[in-house]
């Protein structure tokens, strides 16, 4: 069972994380650890919607309109994606 992230939570990119899009895919640099990460096209869409939306729920709604996926599968995938990014220090999740 996955950890459910509150839908009113917000995903924020720390100042020491840079993202550049190259041919529809993202390259992310964590300046503090000097680590690079890559995202495929779907991961890049998830990143963009999460980091520009006012909430996880808003990003989830936009992703639902963009991709044909069940709401349950999208919620699980999105929560796992946020959890991984958070553990790597690439995003902060704030509530309120």
Image: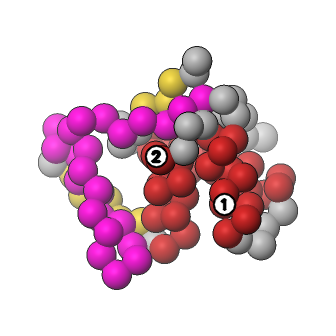
Residues 28 and 54: in front is 54
User: Can you see residue 3?
Assistant: no
Q: The C terminus appears in which quarter of the rendering?
A: top right
Residue drawn where x is 60% and y is 29% of the image: 9
Give the prevailing secondary structure in the magenta stretch: strand
Q: Secondary structure at mark 1?
A: helix
Residue bearing the label numbered 2: 51
- Whether residue 52 is in magenta: the answer is no
* Rendered view: 22 above or below 94: below
The boundaries of the magenta stretch are 9-33
- The answer to whether 83 appears left or right of 16 in the picture is right
Few, some or many residues within 10 Å of mark 1 (<14, 14–19, 20+): many
Residue drawn where x is 66% and y is 44% of the image: 58
Farthest residue, direction top: 96
Query: Residue 46: where, in percent of width, then height?
Result: 54, 58
Query: Residue 72: where, in percent of width, then height?
Result: 83, 53
Q: The N terminus appears in which quarter of the rendering?
A: top right
Query: Residue 54: where, in percent of width, then height?
Result: 56, 37
- Whether residue 32 is in magenta: the answer is yes
For the residues labelled 1 and 2, the Cα–Cα distance comes to: 13 Å
Res 36 label: none
- The answer to whether 16 appears left or right of 57 in the picture is left
Q: Secondary structure at mark 2?
A: helix
* Rendered view: 84 above or below 23: above
Residue drawn where x is 47% and y is 55% of the image: 47
Query: Which of the marked residues, 1 or 2, is nearer the chain's N terminus?
Result: 2
Residue drawn where x is 27% and y is 63% of the image: 20
User: Can you see residue 62?
Assistant: yes
């Amino acid at each position: 069972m996955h950890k459910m992230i509150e839908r009113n939570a917000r995903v924020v990119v720390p100042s020491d994380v840079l993202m550049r899009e190259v041919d529809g895919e993202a390259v992310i640099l964590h300046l503090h650890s000097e680590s690079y990460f890559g995202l495929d096209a779907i991961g890049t869409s998830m990143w963009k919607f999460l980091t520009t939306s006012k909430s996880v729920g808003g990003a989830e709604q936009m992703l639902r309109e963009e991709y044909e996926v069940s709401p349950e599968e999208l919620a699980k995938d999105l929560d796992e994606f946020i959890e991984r990014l958070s553990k790597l220090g690439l995003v902060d999740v704030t509530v309120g």
